[in-house]
Image: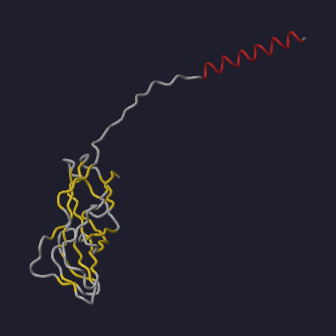
């Protein structure tokens, strides 16, 4: 009886393996692919320049420069913009990469400009055109213009001010 039981059990196990082997199916092969796109870059064309301004000895103020290059005054009203404007320009960059791709723009939160003698002004409220995201044209380029607000203290020391460390602008594909 034991022999019959062992023989029956062996037959069931072997039959089960045969059924399992028939249930397996070999998959067809798949290929792997990838597309390497043009890296995104940003190159400065023009530095930001707020032009000439005057500030009251007793009242602070600010100058807003739009991405399109339009200046206006704000704050406490202590700043005036003379008829001799000097050089006025938003910062301008060329973004290059894969045509028709979108990209995100990261602007600085603030910057300090100084006259080299310890006198400083703060730039903030950066704005851009395009705003926050852009799309590269079919050729893979797009102009990015950036404006900001420059804050002047009452009696700001006269002089030529600049930001030697630059304005960090970052662009990344979306």
Task: Give the farthest residue toward the top.
Answer: 3
User: Residue 123 is drawn in which quadrant?
Assistant: bottom left
Q: Residue furthest bottom?
A: 58
Q: Is residue 94 left or right of residue 1?
A: left
Along the horizontal axis of the image, is 100 left or right of 21?
A: left
What residue lies at 89% left-to-right and 12% top-to-bottom? Answer: 2
Residue drawn at point x = 27 percent, y = 85 percent: 154
Q: Is residue 133 above or below residue 16?
A: below
Residue 108 spot, x, y in % from top left: 33, 64
Q: Is residue 9 above or below residue 94?
A: above
Disc count in the image?
0
Foreground of the two, 32 or 164: 164
Q: Residue furthest front?
A: 117
In the rendered view, does 10 fall on the left or right side of 86?
right
In the displayed structure, 87 sits above or below 23; it is below
> Outermost residue, right direction?
1
Residue 44 rendering spot, x and y as whole percentages: 21, 56
Residue name at image x 35 percent, y 67 percent? 109
> Residue 35's x, y, as percent?
33, 37
The colour mode here is secondary structure
Q: Quadrant of residue 32?
A: top left
Front residue (pair 7, 67): 67
Q: Quadrant of the N terminus?
A: top right
Between residue 158 and residue 153, name the one nearer to us.
158
């Amino acid at each position: 009886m034991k022999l019959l039981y062992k023989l029956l059990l062996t037959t069931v196990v072997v039959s089960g393996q045969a059924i399992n082997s028939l249930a397996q199916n070999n998959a067809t092969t798949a290929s792997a692919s990838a597309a390497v796109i043009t890296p995104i870059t940003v190159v400065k064309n023009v530095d930001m320049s707020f032009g000439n301004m005057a500030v009251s000895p007793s009242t602070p103020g600010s100058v807003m420069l739009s991405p399109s290059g339009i200046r206006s005054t704000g704050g406490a009203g202590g700043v005036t913009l003379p008829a001799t404007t000097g050089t006025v320009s938003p910062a301008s960059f060329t973004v290059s990469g894969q045509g028709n791709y979108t990209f995100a723009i990261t602007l600085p939160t603030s910057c300090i400009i100084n006259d080299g003698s310890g006198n400083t002004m703060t730039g903030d409220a950066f704005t851009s055109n395009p705003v926050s995201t852009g799309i590269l044209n079919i050729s893979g380029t797009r102009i990015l213009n950036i404006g900001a607000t420059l804050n002047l203290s009452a009696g700001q020391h006269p002089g030529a001010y600049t930001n030697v460390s630059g304005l960090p602008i970052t662009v990344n594909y979306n």
